[in-house]
Image (cartoon, rainbow, N blue to C red):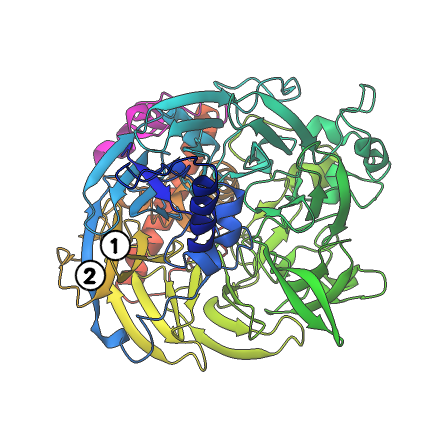
Amino acid sequence: MHELRARPLPCVATFAALLVLAACSDSPDETAPPPELEITATPMGWVDEARILAAAEAEPGSWLAHGLDYNERRFSHLTDINRDTIGELGLAWYRDLGNRHRMQSTPLVIDGVMYFTDPWSVAYALDAATGEQIWRFDPATDKRSMRYSCCGGAMNRGMAAYRGRLYFATFDARLVAVDLATGEKAWDVDTTDGIDLSHIPPTHSNPYTITGAPRAAAGKVFIGQSSSEFGLRGYLSAYDADTGELAWRFFVVPGDPAKPFEHPELEAAAATWTGEWWRFGGGGTVWNAIVYDAEFDQLLFGTGNGAPWPRKIRSPEGGDNLFLGGIMSVDPNTGRMKWFYQATPADNWDFNAAQDIALLDMDVGGVTRPVLLQAPKNGFFYVLDRENGQLLRANPYVRLNWATHVDLETGRPVENPDMQYDEEPQWVWPSNAGGHSWQPMSVDAERGIAYFAVQDMAAFYSLPKEFVETGEWELSPTRMSLGVDFGPPEGGPAAPETHGYLKAFDPLTGEEVWSVERATPYNGGVLATAGGVVFQGDGAGQFAAFDTEDGELLWEFDTYGNADSAPITYRVGGVQYVATLAAGGVRNRYNDGRLLVFRLGGDAVIPEATAPDVEIPEPPPLTASADEVEEGRRIYNRVCFWCHGLGAVGTVNADLRLMTEETHKRFQAIVRGGLYRDRGMEAFADAVTEAEAELVRQYIIDRTIAARAEASGSDSGAPSASTGEDS
């Protein structure tokens, strides 16, 4: 892996060099060896700005950066796998990873080697043609950090390759650099160093986590963090790629105004907040979208939601709450702001704008303009002029009722006054999971079409009981400090149906070119190719290919898991491959994550999964009253459901309705005592009292009884709502 790759000079330059050398020779010797020419040599796997910018033309078979290249369109120009040959696609090889958490990493493929991360940020280098392991690096992520997962477990979306190194973040909020050739660690930094956590109640560890992939350019590595809902204050950091030293940091929301502002933009931002927002952190975490725009030498990134969610708690006298819920442009060298566009002023619904951003040029009203495209959670698809942030288009791409439209003159959404849940608890579209979340989209720049996952889901929002009764709300050391109560109470309004789609969408006209419903509402990222094929996996495990023209199903493969990752394609040795990751799913709890790689003529086979035994056992007697069960539901939704599912219906983590009699007996020891700490279940003694934990257990018993009744054919009354999988 240390061999040098020679880059010969072009023929004309070589001939010219020989002429110069001959002219300088007093007595040419025909027997002398030919003169040595200076040839630029770079290490195998070397990636820099020039290579990434030239990749689309020079090496379409590589996948050099998170979104393929700096434009992040995820549209491949490879055509060997096309709508005519797709029927020959088969599994080339696979690799079991032994990790049951969500598989969301985008692999990189550089000079025949594939690099990717698993949910615990373990980095791998594999031969991209055979799957043979070259090296593996485990950053020893502190697994106790899973307590601060917003969405049911650890996850990691990938890495950046730059100047001979790979950069990736860990779930416990570190940024790591390793040698690309050997996997040896170069440096490892704590991205929360110097952050004021004095407002956060005492807990066992730092609540910052990272799930996103860093980006690298301009001699720096850029990274944000996840999970606004733990009393966090969002920021984006830039580190020197060589040394790991902090170069600059941009805070998304202002801190305590009694203290100095870290940079001048925050003074103006503070005027758009009211109350004592800094006591709650404010939110605004930069948990996913970061894009380097080389044309304008700017770094673009999406900013997160407010925390707590209700603006009535967070900023009681109003204000837009800058810089939540929008797209920020900063100078990558200095971190100073160039412009900002806010998609959801005063965010009230967890409508962050951390979704992926694609760069291209488009004809807008007869004028070719440099634009960015984004479909954030709020349900509108945005087209912005990326030179100045001007709003050009904002078309709805999914059912929504929180706003009627976006005013193109003011750039602001026009909120629906009938949908203010601080006045009346209600179902709101889209849900807090968003009309579209982290799953990357693919953009065909020639056609001006975006292909992406769409989630038609609503969420039930209501202000917390204690805030309604007292007007006070405190940040607590519980797992999630949302400031809302999730799910309607027993007998409340029924949950609307949920649907998930793969859509082809024209962002300029708002036209839905075609739409295909998938088996589950929450599905994977998208890859489209010049071969007329668009790939996407779904939550039921089907990895499928569709015709880019009309959405016709062309091919599918059962992964026996949850195929909601982000696929890529590449070429090695003249062969085109397609790769995707699949996590363990509800149909196979023993599939602990797989990397699957396909090629034309592939004939590898994965072990066939069998449906697990999910017979729900008879629970202990229910001893709580209806009011106590309802209180147990509220506590469960505040503390437990992010890992164990709404209504105690688990998918990735344990389904609590399957608890045995022995587990019920150990419930307090598990929940408050940390008995299962080695399995990733941290102690929650600081989050729930013994009495509250018992109310949660009674609620689980109630849900278990309902599930058994449903299995026997009677109505269970089981609740349904969004998963909240967003960061």
Q: Is residue 438 visible?
A: no
Looking at this rendering, what residue extends furthest in the front direction?
27
| Residue 32, percent from left and from top | 28, 36
Relative to 472, is 641 above or below? Answer: below
Circle 2 packing at 10 Å, graded few (<14), some (14-19), many (20+), is many
Which residue does the numbered mark 2 point to in the structure image?
Answer: 91
Q: What label sits on residue 596 in the rendered view?
A: 1
On the rendered structure, is 412 left or right of 211?
right
Q: Is residue 493 left or right of residue 182?
A: right
Looking at the rendering, the stretch of residues picked out in magenta corresponds to 661-688
Name the kind of residue labelled 2 in the image: Leu
User: Residue 254, which numbered label?
Assistant: none
Q: Quadrant of the N terminus?
A: top left
User: If you read the primary sequence from the N terminus, does the residue marked by circle 1 or circle 2 appear first?
Assistant: 2
- Look at the image and say whether residue 612 sits in the magenta stretch: no
Q: Mark 1 Cα within 10 Å, few/some/many (few <14, many 20+)?
A: many
Callout 1 touching callout 2 (CB < 8 Å): yes
- Asked whether 375 or 60 is in front, the reply is 60
The foreground one among 439 and 614 is 439
Q: Is residue 582 left or right of residue 416?
A: left
| SS of the residue under disc 1 | strand
Q: Is residue 93 visible?
A: yes
In which image quadrant can residue 566 be found? bottom left
**Identity of the amino acid at label 1?**
Leu
Q: Is residue 488 above or below residue 365?
A: above
Residue shown at 61% from the left, 78% from the top: 511
* Residue 60 shown left or right of residue 97 in the figure: right
Tell me where residue 196 appears, x and y as whole percent: 65, 19
Residue nearer the viewer, 302 or 183: 183
Alpha-carbon span between mark 1 and mark 2 = 7 Å
Tell me the element at label 2: strand
**Vertically, is 677 above or below 236?**
above
